[in-house]
């Protein structure tokens, strides 16, 4: 079912400042940047940054999320649902080529299963930091 850890995503208070820290201070290679997400290469695992949701909106998690790469996200999603896993965000498409669903472990840690459309992912990655969506 799960192949590997694909990425770890951190919720940040200032996306631009955090992206600069990961790129310039830590020296990670920026793969792509959107107004709502910045992804960095880190030894085969993506480090992602997402802005925290404003106080008046719904609650944003305080801990990072871990994304597990799977071959068939719909099948994995259905198998996990049958096992009683409660999803906090159902199956959905992402602009960078991912199809994913989000759930929590018994302690509330955020986990995701992700299937990639590799062609779209590589196309977006090839654009890299040059294009901000």
Image: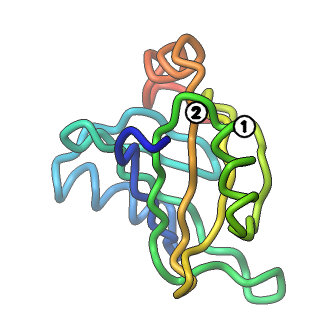
- In this figure, what is the number of numbered marks? 2
Viewer-proximal residue among 71 and 79 = 79
Residue extending furthest toward the front: 83
Q: Nearer the viewer, residue 93 or 78?
A: 78
What residue is drawn where x is 22% and y is 52%?
24
Residue 97: which quarter of the image? Answer: top right
Q: Nearer the viewer, residue 30 or 131?
A: 30
Image quarter in which the C terminus is found: top right
Residue 75 placement, left or right of 41:
right
Residue 17 is drawn in which quadrant?
Answer: bottom left
Element at badge 1? helix
Where, by quadrant of the figure, is residue 75 drawn?
top right
Residue at x 59% of width, y 66% of height = 51
Tell me if mark 1 has few (under 14), some (14-19) or many (20+) residues whose alpha carbon lies within 10 angstroms of its own: some
Question: Which residue is under mark 1?
Answer: 74
Coordinates of residue 19 in the picture (x, y in percent): 39, 56
Return the disc, 2 or 1, that comes first in the chain's sequence. Answer: 1
Above or below residue 38? Residue 84 is below
Does 8 sit left or right of 34 as displayed?
Answer: left
Q: Is residue 56 left or right of residue 51?
A: right
- Identify the element where label 2 is drawn: strand
Q: How far apart, in angstroms, are the residues tagged by discs 2 and 1? A: 9 Å
Return the residue nearer the eye: 74 or 40: 74
- Determine whether label 2 and label 1 are within 8 Å by CB: yes
> Looking at the picture, does residue 83 appear above or below residue 127?
below
Give me the residue at 40% from left, 43% from top: 6
Q: Which mark is drawn over residue 13? A: none
Percent position of residue 21, x then y = 28, 61
- Judge the density around disc 2: few (<14), some (14-19), many (≥20) Cα neighbours within 10 Å: many
Q: Please provide percent x and percent y for residue 53.
A: 70, 75
Q: Which residue is mark 2?
A: 115
Residue 126 appears at what percent x and percent y? 44, 16
């Amino acid at each position: 079912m799960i192949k590997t850890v694909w990425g770890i995503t951190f919720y940040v208070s200032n996306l631009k400042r955090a992206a600069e820290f990961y790129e310039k201070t830590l020296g990670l290679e920026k793969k792509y940047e959107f107004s709502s997400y910045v992804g960095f290469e880190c030894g085969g695992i993506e480090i992602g940054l997402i802005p925290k949701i404003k106080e008046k909106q719904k609650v944003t998690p305080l801990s990072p999320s871990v994304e597990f790469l799977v071959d068939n996200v719909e099948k994995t999603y259905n198998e996990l649902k049958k096992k009683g896993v409660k999803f906090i965000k159902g199956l959905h498409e992402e602009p960078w080529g991912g199809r994913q669903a989000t759930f929590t472990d018994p302690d509330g840690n955020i986990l995701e299963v992700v299937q990639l459309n590799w062609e779209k992912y590589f196309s977006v990655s090839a654009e890299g930091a040059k294009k901000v969506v």
